[in-house]
Amino acid sequence: MCGIIGYTGRRSAAGLIIGGLRRLEYRGYDSFGVATKPDDGGIAVFKKSGRISENECALDDLSGHHGIGHTRWATHGIPDDRNAHPHMDCRDEIAIVHNGIIENFAHLKKDLEGRGHTFRSDTDTEVVAHLIEEHFSGDLFEAVRMAVKDLEGTYALLVIAGGDGRLIAARNSSPLVLGVGDGEMFAASDLAPLLEHTERVIFLEDGDIAALSPGGVEICHAGKAVTRGVERVAWRLDDVHLGGFAHYMLKEIFEQPQVFFETFRAPVSDAVAHAVSRADNISVVACGSSYHAGLTFAYLAESLCGLPVRVWQASEYRYYPPPLPGSAGAGLVVAVTQSGETADTLAALKQAKAHNLRTLAITNVPGSSVTRIADSTYLMRAGPEISVAATKSFIAQLAACMRILTRLCGNSFDEVISRAHIAIGEALLTDVSDAVAICASAASVFFVGRGPFYPAALEGALKMKEITYIHAEGYAAGELKHGPFALLTPDTPAIALCMPGATHGVMLSNIKEMKARGAPVIGVGVKGDAELAEVVDVFIPVPETEEVLQVLTATVVLQLLAYHTALALDRDIDKPRNLAKSVTVE
């Protein structure tokens, strides 16, 4: 959830770290902080609640070529100056930043206070600084190695000390990647802040502890020295620039035709092809938008290929799993996660593997945790996604799911889906201004659809609530009469996805039922649907195409509607309140 970055090398650390934190703000932006090691010794720290842009000039006094930084999404303690990272030991000789949750921090804190330690924050992280302090006698690597033995939970740690010239990194179930430069080393919670400095990276494994110096890195695992390979990443620096767009979300929406095309046409490994071809049933585990992508896949796979698919919210699968066979059988568990680090999805995947089930990951991040756990991986081609609200990563997930769909159905839909990027591009030209005028003044908005357009409605509602702060709910259209009708008023608009096909007639009936309750209805349908245009208050036409592609075009229209509504309400579109991009805690 939080973003961390560290640097050691020939350049001034503070400015480089601040630049990296800006690229990590989508992981958290309640507060931030930087600690550097000045050349004359000691540790210099600045930390503050609020955004980096509001306090950046205060960092001018931090000097040194060695430092760590943090941008926070609060878990333990309110977002204020005292709870901002970095955290220090009692003697202000050790500074630490942390992503994750220390589950046994209350017990550790009580013991440390009993041994005379003084705490200055409400965070779980501070216990780690004091544990390291107890073991530190000049060798920071050894002190960290000893301290993490007492920790229960998840962590990505970066640590510096006045009495040691190295930057220490440690990982357990929280992402941490090293960047290899020319006479300099980097560490960060993901790739985004590294791209402008190096394309060479090292992905740490759970349990790794690394000592970084300008000349290289030494890594230890379970008390033994290990070597982790250096990989080259294909992401470009241009991918994390706005490129003339007002917001990253809008930029990423307009990148979707290319993202879909590249993901759908990405090579399918033999392992993925074999896993899919053997499956006679599939279980999908995912969270948030990824769950909606999985639900879309289930509708399409069952209706077009006759393959049974169950979709589970990963947070529920872990604690209430379905009956699982004792052997691999012909079932396949598919984990869908943009970051590859979603804690609940990883836990569900581990549970599936513990029951000897074959597993497949769909993710956007090479080297992420899910790629190490799953038996095989379909790697999306979305590139870095900066806006908190998922758009192009969701479309890329649908592309990956549809590629799997073509495999399951004997490539019979390959030609149709290969035209998807054209349909998406046409949908980007849709005018949603009349619908925005209705939504921007609403206290609540309902999104309804049937069949594969039900998960599209769920995703549309999620986008609306995420970035506009308008209460929004997605429903299967037939369910409205089972309770939600009580909430329909002239101030409660409904957005109905009414596409040609088997459900068109019944959707029209549902729309008339909503209209009879006084709710204004915004209809999304294909161009030329005069019957739909006549019955709704606002008609949003999308290009007429095959049903499997209409799911994509409807999704794009709902993304645009959420974006322009948020813009009309002057919301912080890329960094909506209380949210973070990568949910790495349970």
Image (spheres, grey):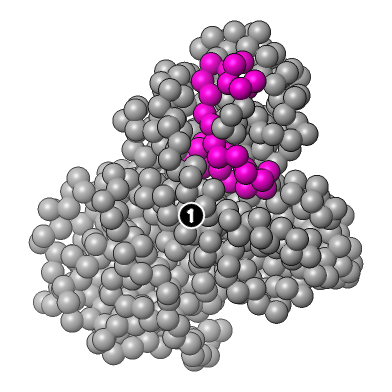
Which quadrant is the N terminus positioned in? Answer: bottom left
User: Which residue is drawn at the image coordinates 47% and 77% (left, top)?
Assistant: 203
Q: Residues within 10 Å of mark 1 (few under 14, many from 20)?
A: many
The answer to whether any part of residue 512 appears in the image is yes
User: Which residue is drawn at the image coordinates 59% and 8% (left, top)?
Assistant: 518
Of residue 25 and residue 377, the one placed in the foreground of this image is: 377
User: Which residue is drawn at the image coordinates 58% and 56% (left, top)?
Assistant: 419
Is 554 in the magenta? yes
Compared across the picture, whether 253 is left or right of 482 comes to: left
Residue 175 location (% of width, % of height)? 48, 67
Residue 467 location (% of width, % of height)? 43, 36
Residue 176 location (% of width, % of height)? 45, 70
**Circle 1 sits in a helix, a strand or a loop, which is it?**
helix
The rendered magenta stretch, by its main secondary structure, is classed as helix
Of residue 570 and residue 162, the one placed in the foreground of this image is: 570
User: Which residue is drawn at the image coordinates 59% and 16% (left, top)?
Assistant: 534
Quarter occupied by residue 406: bottom right
Q: Is residue 482 above or below residue 69?
A: above
Compared across the picture, whether 385 is left or right of 555 comes to: left
Residue stretch in magenta: 530-559
Amino acid of disc 1: Pro
Q: Is residue 374 above or below residue 435?
A: below
Residue identifier under label 1: 257
Of residue 490 and residue 571, the one placed in the foreground of this image is: 490
Residue 217 location (% of width, % of height)? 37, 87
The answer to whether any part of residue 351 appears in the image is no
